[in-house]
Amino acid sequence: MELTINEVEIRQTRIDDVSLVYQFIHDLAEFENNLDKLTATEDNIRDALFGEHPCAEAVLAYYDGAPVGFAFFYTCISTFAGTPGIHLEDLFVKPECRSKGIGRALLIYLAQLVTDRSYGRLEWTVLNWNEPAINFYKKLGANPIAECDLYRLTGDSLDQLAAEA
């Protein structure tokens, strides 16, 4: 699916876009001061998007013909509602291109994808220090889930738990 909103073109990624997607991931890590945590490679991203068992999707945003942002997402499910949804893992727009409707266009695209697939939700997390993003999401009508905190197992903790099998 392709979508043009105002001057923003949104399209699904193709295998030859992997380097560009990876560059946006790098730019996002840099923006979040997390370059030291970026261990993904272009091969990891290619496998996630186009491998034998793809587990994610991505779309690119173009403004005046130039790539300016992306959204990386995957299917999730609500067991309570019994319906799938989309979890937006990352959304990034180049800083110099913000306030042009690009982030909004990416979210409109994803909202349309959710409705086209008859899914029930579009959800994401946001870093609690990222006030501009929080304000942007609230203007769209998104609400934080106050009763939820994100937990994660990685590294040694993950390995130790898995070793109990």
Image (tube, rainbow, N blue to C red):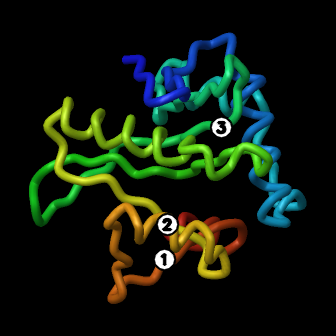
Question: Is the Cβ of the residue at disc 2 closer than 8 Å to that at disc 3?
Answer: no
Q: Quadrant of residue 75?
A: top left
Q: Position of residue 94 (x, y in %)?
A: 75, 44
Q: Which residue is under mark 1?
A: 150
Camera-side residue of 120 and 103: 103
Q: Is residue 47 left or right of residue 140?
A: right
Please name the residue shown 79% across and 47% down the image: 96
Q: CA distance from mark 1 to mark 3?
A: 25 Å
Camera-side residue of 7 and 104: 7
What amino acid type should be assigned to the residue bearing mark 2?
Thr
What amino acid type should be assigned to the residue bearing mark 3?
Gly
Indicate the secondary structure of the residue bearing disc 3. Answer: strand
- Please state which of the two labelled residues, at mark 2 or mark 3, is closer to the viewer: 3
What amino acid type should be assigned to the residue bearing mark 1?
Leu
Q: Position of residue 91 (x, y in %)?
A: 58, 49
Indicate the secondary structure of the residue bearing disc 2. Answer: loop
Question: Is the Cβ of the residue at disc 1 closer than 8 Å to that at disc 2?
Answer: yes
Query: Taking 105 as reference, is 66 above or below it?
Result: above
Camera-side residue of 146 and 107: 107
Q: Which residue is under mark 2?
A: 125
Marking on residue 13:
none
Q: Is residue 156 left or right of residue 39?
A: left
Q: Which residue is under mark 3?
A: 69
Q: Position of residue 104 (x, y in %)?
A: 47, 47
Please name the residue shown 70% across and 34% down the image: 68
Q: Quadrant of residue 81?
A: bottom left
